[in-house]
Image: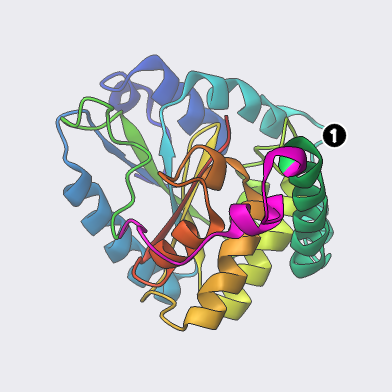
Amino acid sequence: MDGANNNELQQYNEITQEIIEKIKCPYQVFLEKCTVEEVNTAYKKALGRGQKEGFVPILVQADNTLAEWLGILEDESYSKEEVIGKGKISGKDILEERYAQYVEDYEEDFGSSSGDNSASEELIGVMEDGEEINYLTSFAKFSGEGIVETILFEIPVKNPWEVIAWMPMGGWNECPEASDMMAVCRYWYEEYGAVPAAFSHDEVEFLLEKPIEDEEMAWKLAKEHYAFCPDRVDQGTRNGTIGEVADSIRMSEVWYFWWD
């Protein structure tokens, strides 16, 4: 759809309507009866079409908290161009600084009880037990049946990282603020082809054409994933190690992040 027609909007829930009216881009809505596979197929088709037509698709969950945050898009003082300009800072430097700080904090919290190994060595672990992730799933219901109502937007930008100007989430707890998130998105896209694909108020998923199979690169990325989102390790793994994330990276086309 090219706009928010009032009659057509009425078939969607109120949160979906509110998000559509704030983002103001062409869209397609997936109702709760749709499957994760259907949404993924539609997204990938839109991604290919966007490369020819000059847009970048994103999937946005009908999330009440996110809908409230997106009110900033209606603020006269908010400038998408200004946010995009701030995204030119080094995403790599941001991740290196965050990683050093989180490892230092981890050593302070757990160093005294780590035995013969340093706490950071235990945090890093070994490359094993990773989960293969090849579908975008942040919009799936926890019950495993159907999805939360979800919108696929066509964002009128040339570069994938610029979608953050339309989706300025973050800046709370350990979730990077929008300018830092954009810088990281740019870095990961330029280095690895990772496209920011799906959003809720506390989740971001990236899609790649193929997994990063090189072990050395997977280790480097796993540390960057921890820097970007410590909960990816602390609450998103069975072993609580960066090595488990590295193992997942080398077999997965999707990178999933959730901030508690």
What is the chief secondary structure element of the magenta stretch? loop
Q: Amino acid at mark 1?
A: Ser
Q: Secondary structure at mark 1?
A: loop
User: Colour scheme in the image?
Assistant: rainbow
Say which of 65 and 109 sits in front.
109
Say which of 132 and 93 sits in front.
132
Task: Look at the image and give the residue range highlighted in magenta.
Answer: 111-133
Which residue is depicted at the point 60% across and 20% down? Answer: 68
Which residue is depicted at the point 27% across and 28% down? Answer: 141
Which residue is depicted at the point 38% across and 23% down? Answer: 6
How many neighbours does mark 1 have within 10 angstroms: few (below 14), some (14-19), or many (20 or more)?
few
Residue 237, compared with residue 147, is above or below; it is below
Asked if the stretch drawn in magenta spans residue 86, the answer is: no
Residue 115, compared with residue 248, is above or below; it is above
The image shows residue 238 at horizontal and vertical percentages of 40, 44
Question: Can the viewer see residue 158 in this picture?
Answer: no
The image shows residue 233 at horizontal and vertical percentages of 54, 47
* Left or right: 111, with 130 as reference point: right
* Left or right: 109, with 159 as reference point: right
Question: Which residue matches tag 1?
Answer: 77
* Left or right: 88, with 234 as reference point: right
Asked if the stretch drawn in magenta spans residue 119, the answer is: yes
Which quadrant of the view contains residue 156?
A: bottom right
Question: Can the viewer see residue 191 in this picture?
Answer: yes
Report the number of discs: 1
Which residue is depicted at the point 65% across and 37% down? Answer: 169
The image shows residue 196 at horizontal and vertical percentages of 51, 57
* Quadrant housing the N terminus: top left
* Quadrant housing the C terminus: top right
